[in-house]
Image (tube, rainbow, N blue to C red):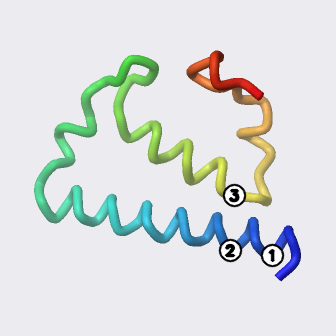
């Protein structure tokens, strides 16, 4: 696999886990907890949505985003 194929595979694996986690949250009736705000978003679901958007290599939306924790900036 070349670098691009590796990145695409990794993104697919992340999205697959995200789908399983979402399903588990719904199956266990935990969804209400994820509707609560986090320190940086109106609700925790926003972070799941951000992961999906960032993993979409056909979208440029996340390219203008910045890290929540600026101390982790490269």
Vertical position of residue 72 compared to residue 46: above or below:
above
Q: Nearer the viewer, residue 9 or 28?
A: 9
Residue 25, located in which quarter of the rendered image? bottom left
Question: Disc 1 to disc 2, how far (Cα)?
Answer: 6 Å
Q: Earlier in the sequence, mark 3 or mark 2?
A: 2
Q: Residue, x 43% and y 66% (percent of image)?
A: 17
Q: Position of residue 21 (x, y in %)?
A: 33, 61
Q: Position of residue 57 (x, y in %)?
A: 76, 59
Residue 20, located in which quarter of the rendered image? bottom left
- Please say if the residues under marks 3 and 2 sit with CB atoms less than 8 Å apart: no
Q: Which structural element holds mark 3?
A: loop
Can you identify the residue that label 3 sits on? 56
Q: Which structural element holds mark 2?
A: helix
Can you identify the residue that label 1 sits on? 5
Q: Nearest to the eye among marks 3 and 1: give it.
A: 1
- Please say if the residues under marks 3 and 1 sit with CB atoms less than 8 Å apart: no
Q: Residue, x 17% and y 40% (percent of image)?
A: 32
Q: Residue, x 65% and y 67% (percent of image)?
A: 10
Q: Nearer the viewer, residue 41 or 70?
A: 70
Question: Disc 3 to disc 2, how far (Cα)?
Answer: 12 Å
Q: Residue, x 25% and y 28% (percent of image)?
A: 36
Can you identify the residue that label 2 sits on? 9
Residue 44, located in which quarter of the rendered image? top left
- Please say if the residues under marks 1 and 2 sit with CB atoms less than 8 Å apart: yes
Q: Position of residue 1 (x, y in %)?
A: 82, 82
């Amino acid at each position: 696999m070349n670098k691009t194929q590796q990145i695409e595979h990794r993104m697919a694996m992340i999205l697959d886990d995200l789908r399983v986690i979402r399903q588990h949250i719904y199956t266990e009736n935990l969804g209400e907890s994820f509707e609560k705000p986090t320190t940086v978003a109106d609700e925790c679901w926003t972070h799941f949505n951000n992961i999906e958007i960032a993993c979409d290599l056909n979208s440029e939306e996340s390219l203008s985003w910045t890290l929540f924790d600026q101390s982790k900036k490269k």
